[in-house]
Image: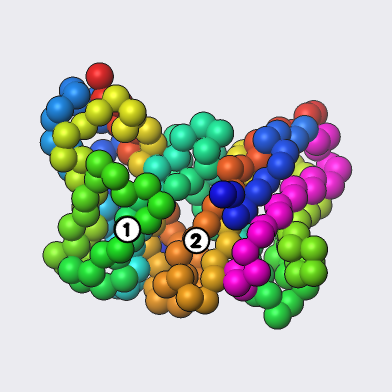
Amino acid sequence: DVKVTQSSRYLVKRTGEKVFLECVQDMDHENMFWYRQDPGLGLRLIYFSYDVKMKEKGDIPEGYSVSREKKERFSLILESASTNQTSMYLCASRAGGPYEQYFGPGTRLTVT
Amino acid sequence: DQQVKQNSPSLSVQEGRISILNCDYTNSMFDYFLWYKKYPAEGPTFLISISSIKDKNEDGRFTVFLNKSAKHLSLHIVPSQPGDSAVYFCAASGGGSNYKLTFGKGTLLTMNP
């Protein structure tokens, strides 16, 4: 079974803080993704990575950056957290090609 | 612009009956479609997929139908069970996009006893 883990299930941060969300997958997948899910908006892609050190912007990259130094780990960074970044953050991974993505359990981030 | 649309935000179905969830797309480059199920406070789980070369794919209680000319797909759940209450997301992928997925906004399916 593919396992995607995220470092925290719930996180509360203050406005202006730098926030790191970590994601690890154990299936040697090439591709990894960060989404955020908001009520009524579905899942929106923030960034994805198709190889180590390779990244590409998704649909809503503003205010975020990412890092992929090792194949199994993909980090999402909020340089200066803002209240409009309060959301559910979901990490996913996939083997190359048109196959399904496997999601982690999500991190519920609240920025106060 | 919304390339994948799920026009019903919610759906209520009696247990034991058929649940039909619908999805429309606008991008003719999409060639692979997936359905995900999501419970609150959990990540989405993959249910079933279909390639554009097919018009039907079946897996147990779940069947996905694809109508390419109408740019429409649907998920049928037969029979519906209590554990099917969840949010269902439709997603699409196109060959030239590094296979990234574009998701619909989701449909909340609620089972009635």
Residue occupying the far top of the picture: A112
Task: Please indicate whether residue B57 sits to the left or right of residue A98 in the image.
Answer: right
Is residue B15 located in the magenta-colored stretch of the structure? yes
Q: Residues within 10 Å of mark 2 (few under 14, many from 20)?
A: many
Provide the secondary structure element on which disc 2 rests: strand
Above or below for B93 versus B103: below
Chain containing the residue with disc 2: B
User: Residue at point 45% right, 40% down?
Assistant: A37
Residue toward you, A63 or B51: A63
Q: Which residue is mark 1?
A: A57
- Magenta residues, start to end: B13-32
Q: Which residue is mark 2?
A: B101
Say which quarter of the image contains residue A50: bottom left
Task: Please indicate whether residue B92 sits to the left or right of residue A75 in the image.
Answer: right
In x, y percent, where is residue A82? 25, 28
Q: Which mark is residue A107?
A: none
User: Residue at point 66% right, 59% down?
Assistant: B26
Identity of the amino acid at label 2?
Leu
